[in-house]
Amino acid sequence: MAFTQRRMIRDAHGREREVVWDVDMSVLAATQKWARDSARLERELRAMTEMYPAWVLTNAAGAQLAEREQRADVAVPTGGAWRWASDGSLLAQTNADTVLMWDGLLPAPLGGLERTRKKLSGTYPVEDIRGQAWTAVPARVQYRSNFPRAEPDVSYSETWLRALQVSSSASQHLYAGGRLCLFYPGQWKIRYTVAEVISQRVINHVYSILKIANGMSPVHAFIGRIHAEKWQPER
């Protein structure tokens, strides 16, 4: 099955435009060991394409997303190599720390969260959709080197957290660097996909953080949190 992705980028001349590319699965397999399992890789790609089509699979060195100086560009696996989406030029050779990472935005309503809305306004877009305030939460999901034996790492933008005046702490289920605490020991199962993690755990976490930014205590914001309960994806 072929997978096509797209994203808005800004090229070297400052022009914003949409780019489209076909995902080269051989590039993914050469980047990270788990992706050599073609059935698993296809399952991951299909799930994200169906549930989060605007998210892009790119690469990162450690936790640092591949970036291009002075451009809103993205590294994409296409045409037999990692290339910059804006012009198809090759990236510098990847190193042993390179892993696969999903980069995207999660829409979130801000109804009843006026303090949160004010904190985001001017720094992150807040749009009125049919009389309801909405924002988009910047997040990334990184496959660990031993995936799927271990869960992926999910992180918020630290700039986004600073705008909300939310810091890393155990009570807020946030590690350093904006990484989310989503699973207790023994909860992760090999069969889970990244799309299921986002839907079943990350979205719940997002709303809790938005409530905390609005002044609610973490104890109440995380009441009924799904990551404190047994969970398996819906069939």
Image (cartoon, rainbow, N blue to C red):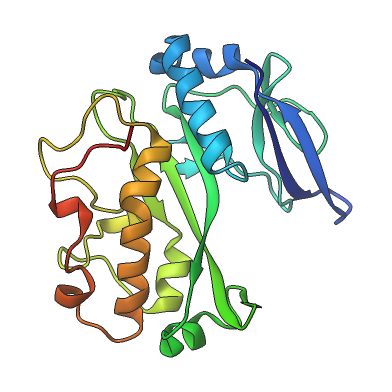
Q: Position of residue 173 (x, y in %)?
A: 21, 60
Q: Is residue 27 left or right of residue 204?
A: right
Q: Position of residue 94 (x, y in %)?
A: 55, 24
Q: Quadrant of the N terminus?
A: top right
Vertical order, 190 against 227 (above or below): above
Vertical order, 96 against 69 (above or below): above
- Location of residue 63 (image quadrant): top left
- Kindly identify the residue that appears in the image at 61 percent across and 83 percent down: 131
Residue 32 in view, yes or no: no
Q: For the view shown, which residue lies furthest in the left direction?
A: 185
> Between residues 47 and 177, which one lies in front from this camera angle?
47
- Kindly identify the residue that appears in the image at 32 percent across and 59 percent down: 204
- Kindly identify the residue that appears in the image at 76 percent across and 49 percent down: 9
> Between residues 197 and 130, which one lies in front from this camera angle?
130
Q: Is residue 153 left or right of residue 32?
A: left
Q: Quadrant of the C terminus?
A: top left
- Location of residue 205 (image quadrant): bottom left
Q: Position of residue 19 (x, y in %)?
A: 79, 40
Q: Position of residue 70 (x, y in %)?
A: 73, 53
Tally the marks: 0
Vertical order, 4 against 155 (above or below): above
Residue 215 in view, yes or no: yes
- Location of residue 142 (image quadrant): top left
Q: Is residue 216 left or right of residue 202?
A: left
- Kindly identify the residue that appears in the image at 48 percent across and 10 percent down: 38
Vertical order, 232 against 95 (above or below): below
